[in-house]
Amino acid sequence: MLFNSLHFFIFFIIVTLGYWSLGWSGRWKLLLFASCYFYMIFQPVYIIILFFTIIIDYFAGIWLENTAGKQRKLLLILSIISNVGILAFFKYYHFLFDNVNHIFGFLQVKNPLPIFDFVLPIGLSFHTFQAMSYTFEVYRGNQKAERHFGIYALYVMFYPQLVAGPIERPQNVLHQFHETYQYDWEKVKSGLMMMAWGLFKKVVIADRLAMFVDFAYKNPSEQTGLTLFMATFFYTFQIYCDFSGYSDIALGSARVMGFDLMENFRTPYFSTSISEFWRRWHISLSTWFRDYLYIPLGGNRVSEWRRYFNQFFVFMVSGLWHGAAWTFVIWGSLHGFYLILAILRDKYLPKLSLPKNLLGKSINLISTFLLVMLAWVFFRAKGTHDALVILKKIGTLSLSQSFKTPLNNVEMWFSIGLIIFLLWKEYKFFHIDTRNSAKFFGLSVLFIVIIYFFGVFETNQFIYFQF
């Protein structure tokens, strides 16, 4: 079920009203049932896979808590293998098959791998990582095993963040499902306004920018460097508004019912370095990789060059997590390369580091933004060939080149104006105050009018649903 649909609007009202009319026992049952329905709207049969992983990790958590010694570590490994195995099969089998096919085709040998016809279960990467965070934390002794099967299932399946995060930790969420929240009008207003802002970012900004991006990236060889540069600039904000908009709606819908989910974005395009960008972008995923991959690999406690390898490896895996294609691997590797290059520059060529005054920060901000923007080319392009064509054309752009766009002049300038408005709001850290009820209702009406008249409802799918 899409957040930007009438179906979800009706679903949200029914579930929220039902939630506040029930006691604790009825609430978790309603939320679990609603979450199952929410997921099954996409792909009904794949809920079996979801429950399979839930059952495995539920019992793994209890066994981990009651086991000691080598058997405990073995249980953790088996739990990891089961989760990663399911993810790897459904997400990466076709990628593996295609690459093996190319190799064996070059050698003129028949591909020994069988062909399977299936599609990737929606949100598999997200709820797999959330389930794994639970077993990791139980293993580390930071979280007690959840004995209530229904509550644990709800931890994995909670509908606001089931499909595209944020990827929660059990310490933050599990205890909330055991609590009975009292109706809080201030939280309701705050949550609804957060949902409205997220919907605004999705349908008014992201989906409007998508019309230009899709046009330019469909056949990049036919476009000029100026057109592709503008399309890449637009995509930089499209993907941010699309994904952060989803996160806003997720956090807002949970807050209406009294739940607090973790922040997933913190004005990432105002970062002055790549490391800062990743402390602000998709925070739940970057901290997941830090806590459960980078630190277990040794983190910063190893030799200098081993640390560089760890950082690069984590970013490469992060790229592969996003998609089963070489373009995503290159995208992640680029960010790893950016980070290592910055560390080496600061250590061995400190004179090249800019002073931390206004001019230095501005240059760092712009250069970081451009590096992130150019890396997005690999994220968005249909393949490595298209990505290289786009980068080559951008590298030779000039203002004298022709400019193609499916948008008229008014739509084009309106799109640019929306980006400026977004940056202004984030630069000012402007938060919509909902404490005054009259102001809240006035702003709500304004948002509804703007979304209705200026929203684009043709590009419905959220970008991160494919992961």
Image (tube, rainbow, N blue to C red):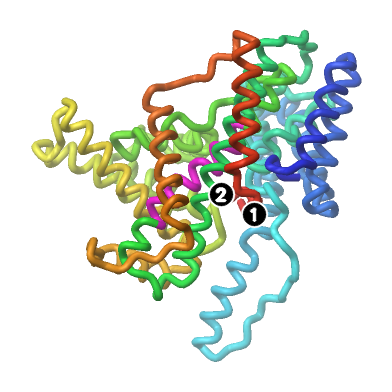
Tell me which residue sits at (74%, 71%) in the image: 116
Q: Looking at the rendered structure, which numbered label has been put on residue 458? A: 1
Pointer 2 local density, CA inside 10 Å: few below 14, some 14–19, many at least 20:
many
Up-down relation of residue 282 to residue 415 (above or below): above
Provide residue 180's location: percent of width, then percent of height. Answer: 80, 11
Provide residue 97's location: percent of width, then percent of height. Answer: 61, 72
> In which quadrant of the rendered view does residue 433 lie?
top right
Q: According to the image, label 2 marks what residue? A: 207
Q: Amino acid at mark 1?
A: Glu
Q: Which residues are magenta?
A: 231-248
Tell me which residue sits at (58%, 74%) in the image: 98
Report the quarter where the N terminus lies.
top right
Instruction: Answer with left or right where residue 108 lies relative to residue 123.
Output: left
Q: What is the chief secondary structure element of the magenta stretch? A: helix
Provide residue 390's location: percent of width, then percent of height. Answer: 36, 66
Instruction: Answer with left or right where residue 386 lies relative to residue 337.
Output: right
